[in-house]
Image (cartoon, rainbow, N blue to C red):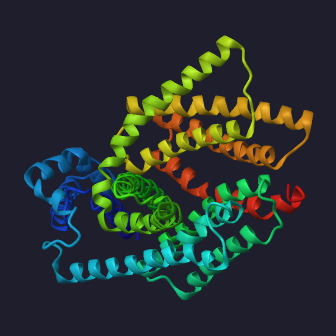
Amino acid sequence: MTALGGQDELEAQFAQWRDYVRRRPELRQSDADELEDHLRGSVDELIAVGLRADEAFLVAVKRMGSLDDLSREFAREHSERLWKQLVLTGETGGEVANARSRRDLLVMVICAAGAVVSIKVPALFGLNFDEDAAFYAPNFSLFALPWLAGFLAWRRQVRPQLIGVLLALFALGAVAANIYPLAEDSQSVVLTAIHLPIALWLVVGLAYVADDWRSSRRRMDFIRFTGECFVYFVLIALGGGVLTAFVVGTFQAIGIEPETFISQWLLPCGVVAAVVVAGWLVEAKQSVVENIAPVLTRLFTPLFTAVLLAFLVALGWTSATIDVGRETLILFDLLLVVVLGLLLYSLSARDPLATPGLFDKLQFALVVSALAIDVLVLLEITGRITEYGATPNKAAALGENVILLANLAWSAWLVLGFVRRRTPFATLERWQTGYLPVYAAWAWIVVLVFPPLFSYL
């Protein structure tokens, strides 16, 4: 029984290692198989000389060297592969893969067209983007995210029960965005416009993980998908900006003013369609963007660390207080979210077998700096609420900063333990992926409970 248990544990280690290797963009399936055969041979040799299975596995992996080095070696040998991944349909994937790519492309086009039609339907009832911001602001995410979730659900072939859950949650979001009698200048309109996309994006996450919603690995994959989708969306937006500039310049040159077309058609339709297209691109070309993830993380982590430390030094030097107006609260919350995003994205791109280094210490400094700023903002918000009473904006900011405080505080502790080699990397990863439902729950509370709680202020 012991030998069988050891063999099962060894196969589980091989499965985990194989799953990680297959994520490497430079490696084909045949490359991964070749590496695994080599690894298994080394493990067998070490077991034959008296090592236990787990010891043999660790020693064999260590002997193979860094996967980054192996990947770079394969990239140098087969440099054309990365370029071929940029083609929509390649010749190396086989007929089955090409047929699947064409089906994905067709379904994506249908979903993107559905998003475009959805955002223009309110115009049939006399609504437009210039005069009805109170309607479009909280509802905007409902025009795009259900179609992205639909594409992912189709691609994952999710069960009918999960489709029913997705439809129910999107319907709940539509009700929450429209059922309350909110004035155009209501704080709840702004809060719903900010928090409903967060809640619905995590509904998209349910479609992404499909039947593996309890899996920490699949949740981390969704975090990676989120970051890569953002990268693609920004790239599409930049191209769309150039296109818009050409439309304005060329049509004005012949005496036609295209502002109405741009504001009522090009921009809104382009944005909702770009959300679906970005998700499709990540699914189709995710291995290419995985190369961008470590670069972006390593570029912006030291920059944000320097900015946060400079802010704390300036705050202490001037003895100033933080102005907690609505714009300031949103700014600081976005700053903390970006810091958390850098941490999450670095986790998703990190080699779990690599030892802690200088970059991990830099991340610890970043998290601690953000934690200090979060505490200062919380003290200011609490003081203002005690002195002037609660408003929807301040109450929402208070809750969000408490949630971020808990995450950042425990993250700082885990990162410190990891840097000191007392906490395994998997513990930090599980903490972040397990915290995602907390964000979803708070976003739904703000959207559903806050408007009546504060008398639709």
Residue at the bottom extreme of this rendering: 160
In the displayed structure, does residue 455 sit left or right of residue 183?
Answer: right
- Image quadrant in which the N terminus is located: bottom left
In the displayed structure, does residue 369 sit left or right of residue 278?
Answer: right
When the figure is inspected, residue 249 is found, relative to residue 361, above or below; the finding is below
- Image quadrant in which the C terminus is located: bottom right
Identity of the residue drawn at 52% across and 85% down = 159
Coordinates of residue 74 in the picture (x, y in percent): 13, 53
Q: Quadrant of residue 411?
A: top right
Coordinates of residue 64 in the picture (x, y in percent): 19, 48
When the figure is inspected, residue 194 is found, relative to residue 369, above or below; the finding is below
Tell me, yes or no, if residue 420 can be seen here: no
**Relative to the observer, which residue lies in front, 414 or 276?**
276
Total numbered labels: 0
Coordinates of residue 280 in the picture (x, y in percent): 38, 69
Q: Quadrant of residue 369?
A: top right
Tell me, yes or no, if residue 389 can be seen here: yes
Residue at the left extreme of this rendering: 77
**Relative to the observer, which residue lies in front, 263 or 417?**
263
Coordinates of residue 123 in the picture (x, y in percent): 61, 75
Q: Quadrant of residue 26?
A: bottom left
Residue at the front extreme of this rendering: 255
